[in-house]
Amino acid sequence: FPLIVATQVLCGSEAGVLYQEMVVKQHLATSFSCGYNAFMVGPGDFTFSAIPAQGVSPQQLEHALLQTFQKVASSLPED
């Protein structure tokens, strides 16, 4: 269940880390969501969906998302 918890923390609502970063702080997207299908047999499916803000290319949004992942990952405890 760790990925279910991660989904909620990262983007389970407008308070999620990724929503706050992409939509509220950086204004790169007008909406952002993600989901995890925990009911698949095998590794499962983790998806992201975002609508770029006016003037923002999908590539810019993707680059910012990857940078945000790195920032979040580096702030996690090591254990």
Image: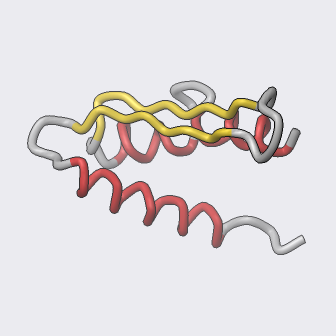
Foreground: 36 or 31? Answer: 36
Residue at the far front: name it.
Answer: 41
Which of the 4 image quarters holds residue 35? Answer: top right
Protein image colouring: secondary structure
Foreground: 5 or 15? Answer: 5
Tell how many labels. 0
- Compared to residue 67, the image places residue 42 above or below, namely above
Pinpoint residue 65: horizontal percent, then vertical percent: 42, 55
The residue under the point 43% across, 34% down is: 49
The residue under the point 68% across, 37% down is: 7
Pinpoint residue 71: horizontal percent, then vertical percent: 54, 67
Residue at the far left: name it.
Answer: 55
- Compared to residue 8, the image places residue 21 above or below, namely below
Pinpoint residue 3: horizontal percent, then vertical percent: 77, 43
Q: Quadrant of the N terminus?
A: top right
Q: Is residue 57 left or right of residue 44?
A: left
Q: Quadrant of the C terminus?
A: bottom right
Pinpoint residue 57: horizontal percent, then vertical percent: 17, 49
Q: Is residue 78 left or right of residue 15?
A: right
Q: Is residue 8 left or right of residue 60?
A: right
The residue under the point 48% across, 59% down is: 68
The residue under the point 56% across, 44% down is: 17
